[in-house]
Image: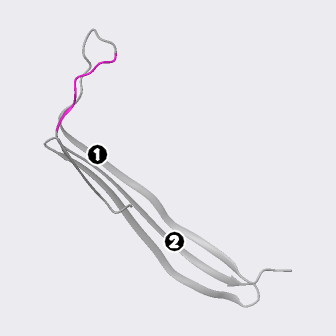
Amino acid sequence: MGCDYIVSVLVKVAGTDGDKFSLGVPSIPIPLTISQTTPALTIFSQMIQEGRVEMEVMIYSPKAGIKEKIPSLKGNSYYKKYVIFFVPYTRKDIP
């Protein structure tokens, strides 16, 4: 007994990209102590993470050939974290 339909998924793009920037004084190890550092003093920093996906779905019928091709499915997301004068601020579209 054969199947009625075959679903084929083609993922064209799936990935993330990120970037970091910081302005201030980083934490510095304290001499003559074990694993102790000064606190970091951040005036401004940003961390940006973006994601993207694009795929196609095709439904085949072994008897009739291509039954239906769904238009390209595309999606984007972002996560942005800022620190401005020691105050953190976050923007995102991910629940």
Instruction: Please state, as top left, top right, bottom left or bottom right, where the C terminus lies in the image.
Output: bottom left
Where residue 90 appears, as percent x and y from the top left, is 26, 53
**CA neighbours of label 1 inside 10 A, class few (<14), some (14 to 19), many (20+):** few
Q: Is residue 74 above or below residue 5?
A: above
Q: Is residue 33 left or right of residue 1?
A: left
Query: Based on the displayed image, in which of its 4 quarters is residue 42 positioned?
Result: top left
- Which kind of residue does numbered mark 2 sit on? Met
Residue occupying the far right of the picture = 1
Q: Is residue 2 left or right of residue 27?
A: right
Where residue 45 appears, as percent x and y from the top left, is 21, 44
Residue occupying the far bottom of the picture = 64
Q: Is residue 20 magenta?
A: no
Q: Are marks 2 and 1 in contact (CB under 8 Å)?
A: no
Q: Residue at x 71, y 82 (%)?
A: 5
Q: From which residue to which does the magenta span run? A: 35-42
Instruction: Please state, as top left, top right, bottom left or bottom right, where the N terminus lies in the image.
Output: bottom right
Q: Find numbered disc 2 in the image and state the secondary structure of the residue it sits on.
A: strand
Where residue 15 appears, as percent x and y from the top left, is 45, 58
Of the pair 45 and 93, the residue shown nearer to us: 93
How far is mark 2 from mark 1, CA to CA? 29 Å
Where residue 87 appears, as percent x and y from the top left, is 17, 45
Residue placed under numbered mark 1 in the picture: 20
Q: Is residue 37 magenta?
A: yes
- Which kind of residue does numbered mark 1 sit on? Lys
Residue placed under numbered mark 2 in the picture: 55
